[in-house]
Image (cartoon, rainbow, N blue to C red):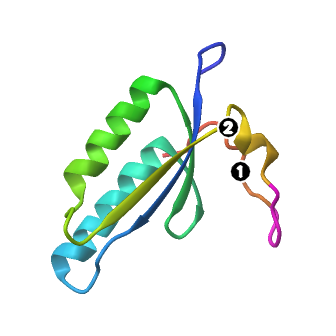
Amino acid sequence: MDGELTVDLLVTYDVETVTPQGQRRLRNVAKICEAYGHRVQKSVFEVVCRDVDKIRLVAALHAAIDPLQDSVRIYRLPANALDEVEHLGRPRAIDPRGPLVI
């Protein structure tokens, strides 16, 4: 994405996992997020993408969840906000602007 305008996003989700269908949705939501960003906690992803990719991400997540039982939150952060994250604990293992390994 060198030279392209990008947005920084924080994606969080809470998917009902009591039923087998919910467990499938959870795996699907995680797989979608992994295609766009880096997992930084169990249900939290840092995403750096173009606006068109954000539209695709939102559409894929919307199609994957049950809106009556699941919740996805997408925070659009200020430009380059992920470069300034204050991190405590285990060292940060990824560069939010680094390549995705799928």
Q: Quick check: is 50 in the magenta stretch?
A: no
Q: Secondary structure at mark 1?
A: loop
On whether residue 87 falls in the magenta region, the answer is yes
Q: Is residue 64 left or right of residue 75?
A: left
> In the drawing, does residue 55 fall left or right of residue 23?
right
Residue type, mark 1 in image: Ile
Dot 2 corresponds to which residue?
A: 98
Q: Residue at x 65, y 13 (%)?
A: 3
Q: Identify which residue is drawn at 29% across, 59% down.
A: 28
Cα separation, mark 2 vs mark 1, equals 7 Å
Give the x, y percent position of residue 97.
Answer: 67, 36
Q: Write down the quadrant of residue 17 in the picture.
A: bottom left
Magenta region: which residues? 86-91
Name the residue carrying label 1.
94
CB under 8 Å between callouts 2 and 1?
A: yes
Horizontal side of 43 relative to 32 (left or right) equals right
**Front residue (pair 1, 8):** 8
Q: Residue furthest bottom?
A: 18
Magenta segment, prevailing SS (helix, strand or loop): loop
**Horizontal and vertical percent position of residue 44:** 54, 61
Q: Residues within 10 Å of mark 1 (few under 14, many from 20)?
A: few
